[in-house]
Image: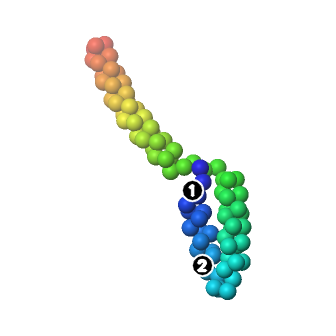
Amino acid sequence: MINAQKLEEIAQQVSNALPSGLKNVAEEVEHKTKQILQGQLSKLDVVTREEFEVQTQVLLKTREKLVALEKQVAELIEQASSEQE
């Protein structure tokens, strides 16, 4: 659900922004930043990229089927109206 690599990158960027004399503190800040980000992101109602891509493909197939069914219904209506004449 949460991309650990992205969290690691963000925490590393925060750590790198600190002065070199604060490397020990930077490690603590990095650890705390990860904790805070994970806590806040876990509260969000999000899906993974993979889940999103799967649902996108399902939606595309559903749309294709809908278009085909609409065409079929239109043809059936046309047939029914010409048979009544």
Please state the horizontal and vertical placement of residue 46, each as a whole percent of the image: 60, 50
Query: Which amino acid type is shown beneath numbered disc 2?
Result: Asn
53 and 72: which is toward the camera: 53
Q: CA distance from mark 2 to mark 1?
A: 20 Å
Q: Look at the image and tell me whether residue 1 can be seen.
A: yes
Image height of 42 relative to 18, above or below: above
Relative to 79, 13 lies left or right: right
**Which residue ends up furthest to the top in the rendered image?**
84
Q: Rate crowding at label 1 as few (under 14), some (14 to 19) or many (20 or more) other CA atoms within 10 Å.
A: few
2 and 80: which is toward the camera: 2
Relative to 27, 5 lies left or right: left
Give the mark nearer the N terminus: 2 vs 1: 1
70 and 38: which is toward the camera: 38
Query: Which amino acid type is shown beneath numbered disc 1?
Result: Asn
Residue occupied by mark 1: 3
* Residue ID at (37%, 35%): 64
Residue occupied by mark 2: 16
- Colour pattern: rainbow
SS for callout 2: helix
Image height of 73 relative to 39, above or below: above
Image height of 1 relative to 6, above or below: above
In the rendered image, which quarter contains the C terminus?
top left
* Residue ID at (42%, 35%): 62
What is the quadrant of residue 4 in the picture? Answer: bottom right
* Residue ID at (56%, 67%): 9
Q: Look at the image and tell me whether residue 40 can be seen.
A: no
Residue 76: give its label. Answer: none
Relative to 71, 57 lies left or right: right
Please state the horizontal and vertical placement of residue 28, each as a whole percent of the image: 71, 72
